[in-house]
């Protein structure tokens, strides 16, 4: 440990460990500029642009539709936003407006779209011109009302604006004599790319124009999109693998364009821009390819966390690829997480998605599972622990203490309250025509054909997923109540409720004894895991009673996304599991901090003791493992073994952070020593130095597992 905290930043590895050097020195220096925040700090607010970017009053006075107003904002962004073309960059395009980083549409005081992965694959296949043809054909078929025509015309306007933005880059590239990038850009993204260079440039321009206008979409299955282009070009001798790696590296580096190294909060990389690698295609064929390897090469060398990666694993996964994933995980930062498609694909089919679409699953830019390019995604988070508190009347000392003659009667009351909560959530989705999403609508299947927007049931699938938080803590509390009150009779329920209302005051020894002696969720405990399964089964079965309502799909999920230390925290009381008011409890569907004592394999067994085929939207398991336990080939074998165990036992999504607590404490005191130390927070990665102290403590206080 001591040697770790003395190390300075060595290239890009936060721990100072040596990483392979495959990229050119120019590319590595470009990465350092971006990672330092130099590029991000050059962003401008629309108020700072010299030419003045403002929608004229006359436009408002003409009473345009919301869609036309949105399209006008997009046009002005395309015309007026600053360009950034840096010497040596191999890809053009930059999201240079500060407002876009605030999750809003620049020039408009309205929220933009995130938690989605839109149809970049289709856009690459047909280009903007192909999408334009689809829109014109839909208009020509008729049968549209005024609002529908207005939306489709606004879509055409946004395509024209994307062309304006692209042509401004072409002019600048021509003036600076950057022929290589000029050639890769001139045909795309209006037309389908014809080679790998064009495909990389087209994907970047499609994605970054959305970003410039405030939308935060995931990338999706980048190796599926780009792999065939590279395979053809390599076979034809049009590019070599080193040149291709440089292009992928520049894509990854430019993804750091919003780093400022100044903001403190939930991190500077949480823009929902996840990437999914490997897995099967729509026909069930394994698709890991040269692009899969190149992405992993770049992440291994540069340790860029701004595109968090989820690798799709299965029982058929290539051992070489699995060891590559483990090698990068061992470097730390939690950049590479894993999905288990053996469990996910059947659960999506069971929920009702066609097999081919289920095979093509990605995420919403975080980790929730969806069908990319076809889905408007939203979720409804609620704290299940709050429902148990209501059952026990813990929130007020003035409330009468309930009496339950048995544990099963107590549990039935909790279950009834859970059912009531879910039933009240069913109709919460209200389609919206007031908030425009025209640019997103272009790239989501269904919006053009229906002439309806992303938030107005336009996509093929509109999802509103009920997400339970605090499930692990509910199970722990119920387990403790069952043992102490109904089996061991150490307290009556009334006595225990009074103790919890008083926040364990005067019962510290009892509280500590509970925490030390009971094997809670995460320890492969038969008794504790039976309670977890009971709560899980009841939640998923209650949610499954209404899988769809008014055209809204409702696949169940389990998450907290940091709410365990923000919105949930203030309303949580002491629990029977020995926690006090103000304690930060379980993250997503991981064990509560400090309760898992028997190592990561036991955690995985407890986590996978439930039937995840009932949870089509997914959940996350987080593990934190000390690098001291992962040295040498045995360390890699251990990581590979954990992932194989997770797949074989039927987990869904797992992220592994390999950063030791001593280093994190040192990084709190000396952030300048660790400029690229990244950690996985939930569905996103963040540089540790950009997290608030509260977030840093959350990361540090996760149980450090020993293998």
Image (cartoon, rainbow, N blue to C red):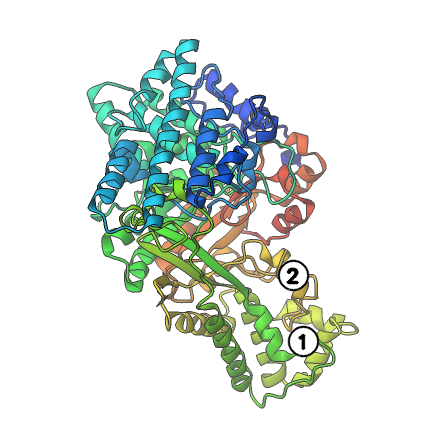
Frontmost residue, 701 versus 487:
701
SS at circle 1: loop
Residue 316 in the image: x percent, y percent? 28, 49
Q: Residue at x 66, y 44 (%)?
A: 692
State the residue at coordinates (37%, 33%): 206
Work out whether 548 lies above or below 453: below
Residue position for label 2: 569
Q: Which mark is residue 647?
A: none
Q: Indicate the position of residue 229 as horizontal and vertical percent values.
A: 25, 29
Q: Nearer the viewer, residue 287 or 433?
A: 433
Could one spot residue 11 in this view of the protein?
no
Q: Reply above or below: 201 against 614.
A: above
Observer able to see residue 569:
yes
In this image, 648 relative to 432: left or right?
A: left
Regarding mark 2 in the picture, which secondary structure is present there? Answer: helix
Numbered mark located on residue 394 in the image = 1
Give the quarter of the image for residue 388: bottom right
- The answer to whether mark 2 and mark 1 are in CB contact below 8 A is no
The Cα–Cα distance between marks 2 and 1, rounded to whole angstroms, is 14 Å
């Amino acid at each position: 440990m001591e040697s770790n905290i003395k190390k300075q930043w060595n290239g890009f590895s936060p721990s100072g460990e040596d990483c392979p050097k495959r990229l050119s020195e120019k590319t590595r220096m470009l990465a350092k500029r971006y990672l330092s925040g130099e590029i991000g700090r050059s962003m401008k607010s629309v108020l700072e642009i010299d030419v003045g970017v403002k929608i004229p009053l006359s436009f408002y006075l003409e009473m345009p539709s919301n869609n036309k107003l949105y399209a006008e904002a997009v046009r002005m962004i395309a015309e007026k936003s600053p360009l950034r073309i840096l010497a040596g960059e191999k890809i053009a395009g930059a999201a240079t407006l500060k407002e876009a980083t605030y999750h809003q549409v620049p020039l408009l005081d309205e929220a933009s779209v995130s938690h989605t992965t839109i149809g970049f694959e289709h856009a690459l296949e047909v280009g903007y011109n192909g999408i334009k043809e689809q829109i014109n054909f839909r208009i020509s078929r008729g049968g549209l009302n005024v609002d529908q025509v207005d939306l489709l015309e606004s879509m055409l306007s946004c395509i024209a604006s994307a062309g304006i933005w692209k042509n401004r880059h072409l002019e600048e590239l021509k003036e600076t004599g950057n022929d290589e990038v000029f050639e890769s850009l001139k045909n795309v993204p209006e037309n389908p790319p014809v080679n790998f260079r064009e495909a990389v440039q087209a994907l970047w321009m499609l994605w970054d124009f959305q970003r410039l206008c405030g939308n935060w979409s995931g990338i999706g299955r980048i190796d599926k999109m780009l792999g065939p282009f590279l395979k053809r070009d390599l076979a034809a001798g049009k590019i070599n693998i080193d040149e291709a790696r440089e292009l992928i590296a520049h894509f990854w580096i430019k993804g750091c364009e919003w780093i400022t190294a100044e903001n403190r909060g939930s991190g500077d990389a949480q823009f929902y821009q996840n990437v999914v690698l490997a897995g099967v295609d729509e026909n069930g064929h394994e698709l890991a390819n040269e692009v899969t390897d190149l992405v992993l090469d770049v992440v291994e060398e540069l340790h860029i966390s701004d595109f968090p990666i989820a690798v799709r694993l299965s029982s058929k996964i290539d051992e070489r690829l699995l060891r590559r994933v483990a090698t990068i995980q061992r470097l730390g930062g939690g950049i590479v997480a894993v999905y288990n498609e053996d469990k996910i694909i059947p659960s999506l089919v069971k929920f009702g998605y066609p097999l081919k679409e289920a095979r093509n699953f990605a995420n919403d830019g975080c980790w929730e599972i969806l069908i990319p390019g076809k889905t408007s995604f939203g979720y409804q988070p609620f704290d299940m622990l709050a429902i148990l508190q209501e059952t026990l009347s813990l929130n007020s000392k003035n409330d009468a203490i309930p009496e339950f003659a048995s544990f099963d009667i107590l549990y039935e009351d909790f279950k009834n309250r859970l059912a009531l909560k879910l039933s009240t959530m069913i109709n919460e989705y209200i389609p919206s025509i007031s908030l425009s999403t025209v640019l997103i609508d272009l790239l989501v299947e269904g919006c053009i054909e229906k002439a309806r927007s992303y938030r107005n049931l336009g996509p093929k699938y509109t999802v509103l997923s009920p997400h339970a938080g605090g499930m692990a803590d509910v199970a722990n509390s119920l387990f403790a109540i069952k043992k102490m009150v109904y089996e061991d009779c150490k307290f009556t329920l009334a006595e225990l409720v009074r103790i919890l209302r008083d926040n364990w005051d005067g019962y510290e020894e009892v509280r500590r004894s509970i925490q030390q002696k009971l094997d809670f969720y995460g320890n492969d405990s038969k008794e504790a895991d039976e309670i977890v399964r009971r709560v899980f089964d009841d939640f998923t079965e209650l949610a499954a009673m209404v899988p769809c309502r008014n055209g809204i799909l409702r696949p169940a999920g389990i998450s907290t996304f940091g709410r365990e230390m923000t919105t949930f925290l203030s309303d949580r009381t002491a629990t029977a599991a020995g926690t006090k008011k103000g304690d930060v409890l379980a993250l997503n569907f991981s064990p509560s901090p400090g309760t898992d004592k028997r190592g990561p394999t036991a955690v995985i067994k407890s986590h996978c003791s439930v039937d995840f085929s009932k949870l089509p939207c997914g959940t996350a398991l987080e593990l934190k493992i000390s690098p001291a336990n992962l040295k040498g080939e045995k360390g890699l074998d251990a990581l590979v073994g954990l992932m194989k165990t997770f797949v074989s036992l039927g987990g869904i999504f797992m992220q592994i952070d390999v950063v030791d607590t001593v280093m994190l404490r040192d990084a709190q005191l000396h952030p300048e020593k660790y400029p690229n130390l990244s950690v996985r927070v939930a569905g996103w990665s963040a540089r540790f130095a950009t997290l608030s102290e509260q977030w840093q403590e959350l990361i540090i206080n996760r149980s450090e597992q020993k293998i």
